[in-house]
Image (cartoon, rainbow, N blue to C red):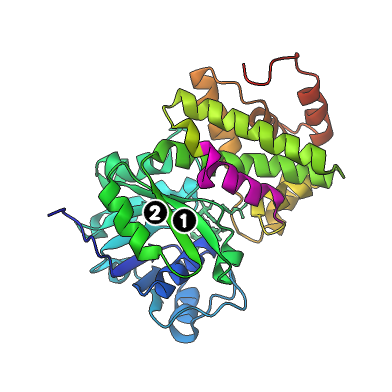
Amino acid sequence: MPGFATDVQRVTVLGAGSWGTAFAKVLGDAGRDVTMWARREEVAAEIRDRHTNGSYLPDVRLPERVTATSDAAAALAGAQAVVLAVPSQSLRANLSVWRELLPADAILVSLAKGVELGTLKRMSEVVAEIARVDVGEVVVVSGPNLAREIAAAQPSAAVVACPDHERAVAIQRACSNGYFRPYTNTDVVGCELGGACKNVIALSCGMAAGLGLGTNTMATLITRGLAEMARLGAKLGADPLTFAGLAGVGDLVATCSSPLSRNRTFGERLGRGETLEQAQAAAGGQVAEGVMSCSSIRALAQSLGVDMPLTDAMHRVCHEGVDPRQAGTELLGRSQKHEWY
Ligand SMILES: NC(=O)C1=CN([C@@H]2O[C@H](COP(=O)(O)OP(=O)(O)OC[C@H]3O[C@@H](n4cnc5c(N)ncnc54)[C@H](O)[C@@H]3O)[C@@H](O)[C@H]2O)C=CC1
Ligand SMILES: O=C(CO)COP(=O)(O)O
């Protein structure tokens, strides 16, 4: 018998932002009992009493079986799976507080798409370190999953990745419903890198749009972005096929093309000439992971000797004051090379 529930019925979602709330709805619509933890009691009360979360997903009604609390201990009691839905750079601090409250046999699931600044760890590595579990037990969900579309029950697919196939299957079953189709994969490295890197490329696509550039530029950024994330993945032992899948090109296309993407929107504002602070203020407290991940992914790539010119350019625009137009000119002026080597 595995030391975890194979038929997961009770799920706790830690984080009541856009994706935490939409994923709780997915689980509720899949027939699971869901308790969400929200940082602010008024958000928890709104979910509990009115089944809405107007600050993040206006006009969305949550299933009756989704409830919420701002008390983490109460949220976690009896959970068979714990879904971590806070931004990447805050996962370590939040999880350190929750660590002692995690039920021993609960499957830990990460929804975050980023690489930690400083440690350069992927989210499953942070979870394993803080929760003191084997990294091979942590489940990752990734794919083209813009929260608002999922919350509107628009059809979409995702990847549920874990080296332990049985754990992946347990979460796959738990979140499978009439509009959300999860596939399993054992390549956590590839899925996590795909999810983190595409946010940075989405910044660049938004920036191009903000500069008034068209579809050829966008397709070039998406394709060369895919090339550089696959290069990083290959160096870290990811399966190259993962980047051709939902967590790679799937999420890349969704995030780079959608006006719903916070990363793309953030980049567009920079392209239009807004400062980082102005774009941050306009984001209204919602996370655009690429703004921090461009620096951590760049540092990770540098430490491994992997060339990631788009990521490097996004870091210089976001954190070194380089003008987006200038960054574009420099990218085009790089030495000529073969498409693959
Ligand atoms: N929104 C989307 O469409 C999708 C988001 N994701 C990923 O899921 C993760 C969470 O994203 P969202 O729910 O969209 O973010 P969000 O910005 O909408 O919400 C973040 C949630 O985390 C909480 N939180 C706890 N500690 C925090 C801290 N120190 N700083 C900021 N927030 C804190 C906030 O109160 C809020 O409930 C991110 O890594 C994101 O890339 C993945 C797929 C889709
Ligand atoms: O990860 C996402 C879609 O899969 C959400 O992207 P944004 O964080 O840019 O909104």
Instruction: Compare residues 217 and 125 and report the one nearer the observer.
Output: 217
In the rendering, at what x and y percent does residue 64 appear? 42, 83
Q: How many marks?
A: 2
Instruction: Please give the residue where the numbered disc 1 appears in the rendered image.
Output: 86
Q: Find numbered disc 1 in the image and state the secondary structure of the residue it sits on.
A: loop
The stretch in magenta equals 243-258
In the rendering, at what x and y percent does residue 335 appear? 75, 13
Instruction: Please give the residue where the numbered disc 2 appears in the rendered image.
Output: 94
Task: Specify which label sits upstream in the sequence, 1 or 2.
Answer: 1
Does 89 sit above or below residue 217?
below
Indicate yes or no: mark 2 CB to ligand 1 under 8 Å.
yes
Does 281 sit above or below residue 221?
below
Question: Is 101 left or right of 276, judged from the image as shown?
Answer: left
Indicate yes or no: mark 1 CB to ligand 1 under 8 Å.
yes
Question: Is 1 left or right of 98, judged from the image as shown?
Answer: left
**Residue sitting at 32 percent across and 67 percent down?**
11
